[in-house]
């Protein structure tokens, strides 16, 4: 298994081009199942999760091509004929977002059989909201042998669906399903994440009728057929936030090219409060720290537009060297503190109290061998290693490859001493 090695203590300085958002790219890929015409996506991130979902779409009948080869960021998906409406466990178990094919398959083919995705290292993330929403739209649902079998022989019908909690996955699924339903569907208490808006804008370009994009109430009037389109994937606010935190951690200065400040403004506000300099430029965000010690700052994770849970681990790494005590409260996922014990290996002083972590800043961290538990925890360990004295070795880096494109190359170009060692066979 590959490892990433870091010799810490170097200031980061330079420019980083922010990739397309993983959390938009994956549902956009599933949207290709809604039409028999080609859907072209530009600014696609080159990630392991994208490749895995591509394999599932191939099984279902979507032909995928990359304009320029394996390293290209332009992808065309063409599901002219759906060959199968079954999403097998072997693939769905590898990537939870593959469960989102349920909505498009049911809307277009009136039948879908999708494996339950199972649990997750950072929480259960149940799919009952997806199922209840589709049932309100007239689908019959059976749970058999670990699969959700959904059918709507006469097609889906418009309905008013109010979610008891904000769910990104349920909003994606039900919004896509509603585009081909008969009548009007209203999604109340819908997720407002920028990635939801990006998918909605793509669906609109395909001929969908969607009102309320960017708000918590979406009104979708079903149409008989969607057509192909070309759409640029929004930039990844989590990747941008991660590199912004890395700049603050190392006392450096990074310009994040393509970053959209308003999509992660809550994180930028917290960085300012901690003592970092943040400026929005034309099509970019600049983050710097002048060398003074950071100040402890409290954070509570919330759904958008609040502080994103996907930056909680990275921000905790930052607070390990801040002056004072910071309290970090995780309200989204119940198991998202597994990085705490690994940060402690650097010398961090962190204690857990239920859904809260109390971080007492230390003068410096020391490099150590560590092991990543999930995607965002991996990034937190990289950030800690960048500032730590000595060498850090990060194990289980396959997590990083799921959500960060060429992270070693991007950091190296800004002065980090970081490299990957391939596993020996």
Image: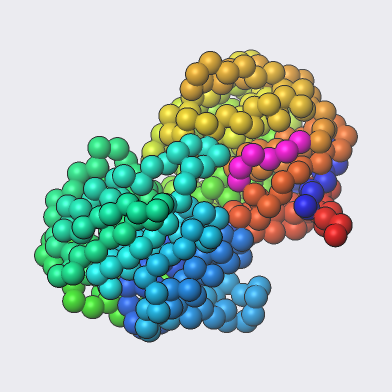
On screen, residue 89 versus residue 188, left or right, reads right
**Horizontal and vertical percent position of residue 100:** 39, 58
Task: Name above or below for residue 42 compared with residue 297.
Answer: below
Which of the pair 259/178 is nearer the observer? 178
- Magenta-colored span: 370-375
> In the rendered image, which quarter contains the C terminus?
bottom right
On screen, residue 34 versus residue 154, left or right, reads right
Which of the pair 262/185 is nearer the observer? 185
Query: Residue at 71% of width from left, 49% of height from top?
Result: 397
**Residue 29 falls in image quadrant:** bottom left
Q: Residue furthest front?
A: 145
Colour pattern of the rendering: rainbow
On screen, residue 196 versus residue 51, left or right, reads left
Task: Name above or below for residue 57 compared with residue 422.
Answer: below
Task: Name above or below for residue 299 compared with residue 30.
Answer: above
Please indicate, yes or no, whether residue 375 appears anywhere in the rendered image. yes
Q: Is residue 290 magenta?
A: no
**Horizontal and vertical percent position of residue 132:** 24, 48
**Horizontal and vertical percent position of residue 109:** 28, 73
**Horizontal and vertical percent position of residue 169:** 37, 50
**Residue 338 falls in image quadrant:** top right
Q: Residue furthest left?
A: 183
Please indicate, yes or no, whether residue 200 appears anywhere in the rendered image. no
Query: Residue at 54% of width from left, 33% of height from top?
Result: 336
Query: Residue at 66% of width from left, 50% of height from top?
Result: 400
**Residue 129 falls in image quadrant:** top left
Task: Name above or below for residue 389 compared with residue 209.
Answer: above
Which of the pair 261/109 is nearer the observer? 109
Query: Residue at 53% of width from left, 60% of height from top?
Result: 90
């Amino acid at each position: 298994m590959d490892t990433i090695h870091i010799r810490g203590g170097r200031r980061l300085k330079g420019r980083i081009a922010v990739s397309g958002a993983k959390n938009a790219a994956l549902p956009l890929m599933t949207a290709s199942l809604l039409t028999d015409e080609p859907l072209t996506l530009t600014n696609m991130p080159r990630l392991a999760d994208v490749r895995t979902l591509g394999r599932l779409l191939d099984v279902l009948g979507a032909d995928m091509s990359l304009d320029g080869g394996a390293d290209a960021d332009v992808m065309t998906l063409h599901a002219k004929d759906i060959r199968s409406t079954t999403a097998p466990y072997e693939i769905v178990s590898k990537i939870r977002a593959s469960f989102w094919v349920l909505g498009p398959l049911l809307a277009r083919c009136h039948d879908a059989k999708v494996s339950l995705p199972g649990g997750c290292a950072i929480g259960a993330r149940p799919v009952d909201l997806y199922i209840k929403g589709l049932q309100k739209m007239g689908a019959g649902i059976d749970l058999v042998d670990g699969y959700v079998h959904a059918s709507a022989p006469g097609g889906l019908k418009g309905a008013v669906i109010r979610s008891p909690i904000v769910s990104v996955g349920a909003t994606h699924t039900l919004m896509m399903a509603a585009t081909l339903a008969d009548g009007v569907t209203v999604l109340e208490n819908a997720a407002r994440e920028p990635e939801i808006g990006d998918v909605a804008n793509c669906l609109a370009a395909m001929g969908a009728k969607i009102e309320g994009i960017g708000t918590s109430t979406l009104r979708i009037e079903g149409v008989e057929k969607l057509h192909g389109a070309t759409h640029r994937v929004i930039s990844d606010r989590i990747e941008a936030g991660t590199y912004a935190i890395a700049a603050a951690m190392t006392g450096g200065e990074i310009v994040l090219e393509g970053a959209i400040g308003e999509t992660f403004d809550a994180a930028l506000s917290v960085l300012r409060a901690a003592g970092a300099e943040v400026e929005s430029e034309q099509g970019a965000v600049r983050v710097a720290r002048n060398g003074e010690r950071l100040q402890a700052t409290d954070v509570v994770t919330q759904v958008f537009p609040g502080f994103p849970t996907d930056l909680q681990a990275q921000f905790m790494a930052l607070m390990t060297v801040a002056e004072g005590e910071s309290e970090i409260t995780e309200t989204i996922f119940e198991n998202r503190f597994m990085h705490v014990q690994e940060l402690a290996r650097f010398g961090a002083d962190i204690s857990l109290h239920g859904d809260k972590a109390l971080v007492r800043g230390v003068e410096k961290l020391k490099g150590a061998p560590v092991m990543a538990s999930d995607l965002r925890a991996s990034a937190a360990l990289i950030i800690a290693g960048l500032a730590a004295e000595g060498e850090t070795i990060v194990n289980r880096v396959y997590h990083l490859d799921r959500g960060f494109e060429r992270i070693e190359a991007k950091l190296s170009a800004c002065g980090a001493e970081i490299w990957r060692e391939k596993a020996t066979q």
